[in-house]
Image (cartoon, rainbow, N blue to C red):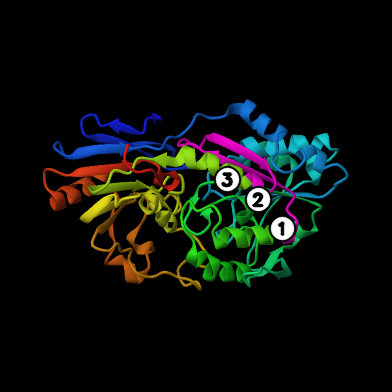
Amino acid sequence: MSTAARIPSVRNTAEIRFGAWYDDRDLVLSFPDEWRIELCAPADGPDIGEAGVASAFANPIGTPRLRDLAAGRSRPCIVIDDLSRPTPGVRLVPTILAELRAAGIEDRDVLILAGVANHRPMTRPDLEKKLGAEVLDVCAVANHFSWDGCVPIGHTSFGSPVEINADFMKSDLKILVGSIIPHGAAGFSGGSKLLMPGISSLASAEAYHRGTCTRGRYAVTETDARLEADEAARMAGVDFLVNSIPNSRLGMAGLVTGDVVSAHRAGTEIARRVFASPTPPGADVCVLSVYPKDGEFLQYLTAFAPWQTAPEPILREGGTVVVALEGAEGLGSHWLFGPGMRLDFRRAPRIKRRDIIFFAPEIDRGSLQPEARAETILFKTWDETEAWLQAKHGDRASVSVFPCATIQLGAGRR
């Protein structure tokens, strides 16, 4: 994808990113001949390369270098997120291990904990994608389980209990590895969220989601949800943070290391620049790709980041939102928001005075909640989607296409 902000269409097509972690690719979408198409791509950024990775580890923010922090330690724990996040652990964890070896810690003494929060456990193929086979060969690797194996360490000032993975709390060097992307509750993901809810108990996660997460907002740096997670990370004694800022092709446009709070804040400033996207107002149709979180249907709301941050409405009343996701993992799993769980969200997606439809090749209607099956407009092919759009909007319409909307923030007109 070009780094240009607005790219004229050719023969009325536009490319979106599709299939993160599975069949990662550009997907060409076609539109009726007389429609006006505008591709609203993020500012983006080139990959920082290995030199950029080395520089970030050599220049941590707010802490000594990791190898210096690790001196005299013997039981490190590295927490890394799952495939619902674009963190390239295969590029980051080997550098962390090298830093630990420089402090005299052998690979076999390192525990890598999959910080899956309330998602499903990671399988061997998942872990190989995230970490690489070489790391799996030399380090102990385990999944976090939010329903067991956590220990209480207190309450935040917001009132949530802080119950954290026991193996993490037993370690004497605590490292979090994640990525910074837009988040509707915490402003941005990454940082301390990999601890709470990443490796917290189900009770902690539920209190967090029922409490501070209900008053969050995209791209606000210090929401209550962020501040509460930061408190929990301080209580748990997190020593070091490694956070990447993804570009549109799962590369790294930026990388920060160091203190769990100050390094994260520095990373959000990079993210604002990388994710900034034009948001022309008043289109008839808006295509939002859920990439790079398009593996599961449950993640579809994350594609509304540019919608939520645009200074003017990007879709007119009576218009149509097309949510595009591959859905390689189907509906997805979540022990709080999934079917039958405590915070289950059952009804079909709705937007006031606008239609929402789904282009999702791997999603079966039967996997949707019973209440949503009849009402959800779901297509498995783009030809069907295009035909539905033309039947509604006729031979002339305007379309704004956001090719990786989950990592895009509205920047107004350009």
Mark 2 sits on what residue? Answer: 261
Direction from residue 72 to residue 400 in the image, left or right: left
- Mark 3, mark 2: which one is toward the viewer? 2
Direction from residue 186 to residue 281 in the image, left or right: left
**Alpha-carbon distance for marks 2 and 1?**
9 Å
Q: Amino acid at mark 1?
A: Arg
Q: Residue 364: where, in percent of width, then height?
A: 35, 57
Quadrant in the picture for the C terminus: top left
**Alpha-carbon distance for marks 3 and 2?**
32 Å
Mark 3 sits on what residue? Answer: 125
52 versus 233 height, above or below: above
Considering every residue shown, the one lying at the far left of the view is 395
The stretch in magenta equals 235-263
Q: Which comes before the other along the chain, label 3 or label 1?
A: 3
Residue 261 shows in this picture: yes
Q: Secondary structure at mark 1?
A: helix
Quadrant in the picture for the N terminus: top left
Residue 130 shows in this picture: no
Q: Residue 71 falls in which quadrant of the image?
A: top right
Disc marking residue 234? 1
Q: Residue 233: where, in percent of width, then height?
A: 69, 57
Considering every residue shown, the one lying at the far right of the view is 72
Tell me whether circle 2 and circle 1 mark residues in contact (CB < 8 Å). yes
Q: Secondary structure at mark 3?
A: helix
Q: Residues within 10 Å of mark 1 (few under 14, many from 20)?
A: few
Direction from residue 273 to residue 323 in the image, left or right: left
How many numbered discs?
3
152 versus 280 height, above or below: below
- Mark 3, mark 1: which one is toward the viewer? 1
Q: Is residue 244 magenta?
A: yes
